[in-house]
Image (spheres, grey):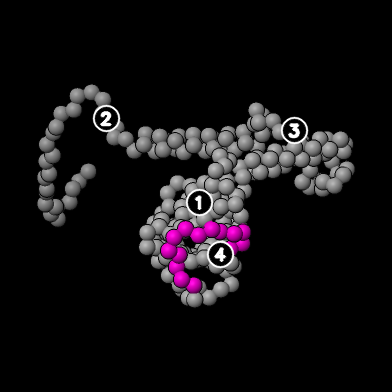
Amino acid sequence: MSQERWDVVLKVLNGPLAAMGEQVFRGPVVRIGANPGPGGLKLTGYRGLDGRQCVVTAYDGGSVSVAPVGTNQARMAPHPNVKWKEIDPLRGPEYLSDGCALHLGPVGRGCTIEFVESRRLGVWETGRLASEAAGQGQVAQMGRMGQPGQGPVPVAIDARSVGQVRASNVPIWFLGILFLMALGTATIILIIGVWVFLQREVVSLGPVEEGYEFYGSIDLDSTEVST
């Protein structure tokens, strides 16, 4: 048995995950279901699926197999354009070939998945290193092009056309806004303070003695008052 790690490439064909396209899952064991656990294909939003519906095993590129978990339904076909009602559920492990389809769960519900392929870990690393090397070559080529707009890169997206950005300098308009905010706050506080000062109760100076108020009345007759 090979000691190399093989990753599994799967593609969901129906339901809410159909827009995800091809997805790479780390081998050698990939669990598929409503709650497969870390590293598995989690089928959220599909009816009739168990937490772990089936398991895909890829110990090497020539022997990738799928097996249902317990009595869960899992069907396999050479391609997805089949009548799943005419295909019996798997009873045990079955080998997968590139492009074959799996239907998990009852017919009319569940999820249909395409097994794209399995790849060695080294293939992914080699491709990634090659892409990084190609990217560095493109950057070096852009550096030799000269001024922005010279070469295949448009000026609108050419990084060389961007001026130097100084994060340590504060723009003048920002300082003006801060000054206006501080001035407005100080004015409001001053107005409130003056209003409170004017509304306060004035305390009388010196001792205060409470007195009594007397009211008297006189009758005015017709007698003339001489001056």
Mark 1–mark 3 contact, CB under 8 Å?
no
Taking 86 as reference, is 62 above or below it?
A: above
Front-most of residues 147 and 89:
89
Residue 54 pos. (x, y %):
44, 57
Label 1 or label 2, whichever comes before in sequence order: 1
Secondary structure of residue under mark 1: strand
Mark 4–mark 1 contact, CB under 8 Å?
no
Residue 79 can be seen, yes or no: yes
What amino acid is labelled 3 in the image? Gln
What amino acid is labelled 1 in the image? Thr
Residue denoted by label 3:
164
Residue 162 can be seen, yes or no: no
Label 2 or label 3, whichever comes before in sequence order: 3
Location of the C terminus (image quadrant): top left
Secondary structure of residue under mark 2: loop
Taking 18 as reference, is 214 above or below it?
A: above
As measured in the structure, the alpha-carbon distance from the residue carrying label 4 to the one carrying label 2 is 94 Å
Give the residues drawn in magenta, as a range: 87-100
Residue denoted by label 2:
203
Residue denoted by label 4:
101
Label 4 or label 1, whichever comes before in sequence order: 1
What amino acid is labelled 2 in the image? Val
**Closer to us: mark 4 or mark 2?**
4
